[in-house]
Image: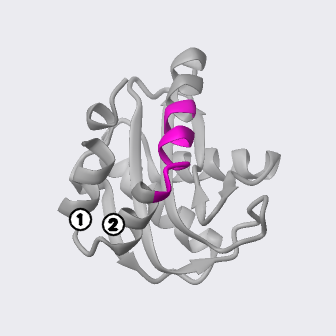
Amino acid sequence: MQISEILSSDSVLCGQTFSSKKMTLEEMSKLLANTDPSISYIEVFDCLVAREKLGSTGLGKGIAIPHGRLKGSKKTIAAFIQLQHGIDYDAIDEAPVDLLFALLVPEDSTDEHLKTLSHLAEMFSNAEALEQLRSETSVEGIHKILTG
């Protein structure tokens, strides 16, 4: 699955200033819920928080990939937030997180979920891509980096 199939520019925020992990996940949940009228913000937020309780999705190097399998969802959806300043996210390296890519898949999409997470982890291990994502100042530019 290509990122361009699951991430629209309407689901990207750039230069945000949230002060906590909870506030960021709330905004991420709104972005995700807005992409699919069959799901609610509360369902999405509860799904993301439940996954975080199992262990932080903060990968290190300022990256987090909050994700989950959502009951009742029929398609894979994604959202991305670039923060102006990193937040405490309980990442494995304890570094603040400033780039978040959220992913929700239908409850029964285990293989797709794992393949997409693997692709994202690979993409976010590229130092040049991370620098571009951090320095970009437009939603369109970020969307192009992520989907190009």
Q: Amino acid at mark 2?
A: Leu
- The quarter of the picture where residue 71 lies is top right
Please state which of residues 142 and 9 is positioned toward the viewer in this rendering. 142
Percent position of residue 123, x then y:
47, 43
Query: Is residue 82 inside the magenta stretch?
Result: no
Check disc 2 and report its element: helix, strand or loop.
strand
Q: Which residue is mark 1?
A: 139
Q: Residue furthest left?
A: 140
Q: Main secondary structure of the magenta part?
A: helix
Residue pictured at 24% horizontal, 42% vertical: 148
Please state which of residues 99 and 40 is positioned toward the viewer in this rendering. 99
Q: Amino acid at mark 1?
A: Val
Whether residues under marks 1 and 2 lie with C-beta atoms below 8 angstroms apart, the answer is: yes
Q: Is residue 35 left or right of residue 99?
A: left
Q: Which residue is mark 2?
A: 13
Percent position of residue 85, x then y:
52, 83
- The quarter of the picture where residue 97 lies is bottom right
Residue pictured at 78% horizontal, 69% vertical: 94
Stretch of the chain drawn in magenta: 118-127
Query: Is residue 122 inside the magenta stretch?
Result: yes
Q: Is residue 56 left or right of residue 63?
A: right
Percent position of residue 3, x then y:
34, 36
The quarter of the image holding the N terminus is top left
